């Protein structure tokens, strides 16, 4: 089983650290959600894990190997990162965009296996009807699904996503979260994602890492993390947490900001 160990991770923009001595281990196939208020470093944390940012101190090891010494192409064969948007959109079809996920494995030409992996990734997210559509013509929600499919096409042992539901409507948010949880279990991989929606996280996450003040405030199951006291301490709001079909559901109380 794949093991990701984050130990003493510290990172800052300039002289002030944003993340300080962050440590946790992921070692089982599950959907892990990172939550916390805006600006606490959730996206920065996952970018540090994926080597998009260089740590100030600490380490991230993948199956005992420090990623600092790994070539980016080698890391991409084992870990995929899905951003919540593309900074620039160039003209290419949906199928070609998803096929880019096979780049870490590419030879001189795409193999039958590459094409089969892409087809399965597109099938999983119901993208086949859009196969020949230019990505510039897609809605933001459709584009997000294409980016997820591209990540799946890498066949990663760890799939990292930065707020993958942020551009989706409620129905598609639920579909994507349910899909990611099942995909982790069915394929034996770790899915680590940044999420800002407390109830979406509570309903689907197998494990939640709550980040506050530069570190891990709490780490555990939905019932462990989604407590009224944790929400008050981290988000500065009053809430009521109830049981809905066996999962916690957060009701934010009006006038409950402190």
Image (cartoon, rainbow, N blue to C red):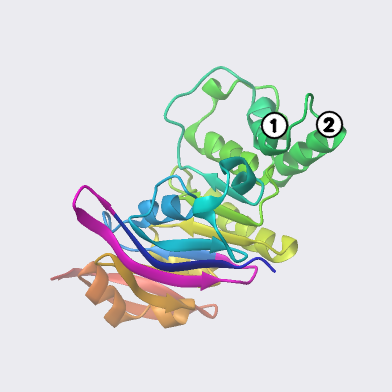
Dot placed on the residue nearer the N-terminal end, 1 or 2: 1
Q: Nearer the viewer, residue 193 or 129?
A: 193
**Image quadrant in which you'd find residue 241:** bottom left
Residue named by callout 1: 99
Quarter placement of the C terminus: bottom left
Residue pushed farthest front?
69
Residue pushed farthest right?
112
Residue 75: which disc? Answer: none
Q: Tell me: residue 178, above or below residue 76.
A: below
Residue named by callout 2: 111
The reply, left or right, for residue 102 in relation to residue 147 is right
Q: Tell me: residue 230, above or below residue 103.
A: below
Q: Nearer the viewer, residue 140 or 87?
A: 87
The reply, left or right, for residue 53 in relation to residue 18 is right
Q: Main secondary structure of the magenta part?
A: strand
- Expressed as whole percent of the image width and height from the top left, the position of residue 246 reads 54, 80
- Expressed as whole percent of the image width and height from the top left, the position of residue 31 reads 57, 65
Question: What is the distance, in whole Å, between disc 1 and disc 2 at their CAs?
Answer: 11 Å
How many labels, in total? 2
Q: Residue at x 70, y 69 (%)?
A: 1
Element type where label 2 sits in the image: loop
The residue stretch that appears in magenta: 12-31
- Expressed as whole percent of the image width and height from the top left, the position of residue 201 reads 46, 65
The reply, left or right, for residue 193 in relation to residue 253 is right
Mark 1 neighbour class, 10 Å CA radius: few under 14, some 14 to 19, many 20 or more: many
């Amino acid at each position: 089983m794949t093991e990701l160990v984050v130990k003493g991770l510290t990172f800052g923009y300039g002289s002030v650290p944003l993340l300080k001595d962050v440590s946790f281990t992921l070692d089982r196939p599950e959907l892990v959600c990172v939550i916390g208020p805006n600006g606490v470093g959730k996206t920065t944390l996952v970018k540090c894990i994926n080597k998009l940012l260089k740590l100030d101190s600490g380490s991230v090891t993948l199956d005992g190997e420090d990623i600092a010494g790994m070539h980016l192409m080698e890391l991409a064969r084992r870990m995929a990162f899905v951003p919540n948007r593309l900074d620039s959109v160039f003209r290419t079809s949906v199928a070609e965009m998803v096929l880019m996920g096979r780049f870490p494995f590419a030879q001189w030409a795409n193999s039958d296996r590459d094409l089969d992996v892409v087809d399965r990734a597109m099938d999983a997210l119901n993208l086949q009807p859009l196969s020949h559509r230019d990505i510039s013509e897609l809605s933001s929600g459709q584009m997000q699904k294409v980016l997820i499919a591209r990540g799946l096409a890498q066949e990663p042992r760890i799939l990292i996503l930065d707020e993958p539901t942020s551009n989706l409507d409620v129905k598609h948010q639920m579909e994507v979260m349910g899909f990611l949880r099942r995909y982790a279990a069915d394929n034996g991989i770790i899915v680590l994602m940044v999420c800002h929606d407390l109830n979406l996280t509570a309903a689907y996450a197998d494990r939640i890492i709550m980040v506050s003040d530069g570190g891990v405030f709490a780490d555990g199951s939905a019932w462990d993390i989604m407590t009224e006291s944790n929400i008050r301490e981290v988000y500065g709001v009053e809430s009521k947490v109830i049981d809905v079909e066996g999962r916690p559901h957060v009701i934010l109380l009006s006038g409950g900001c402190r």
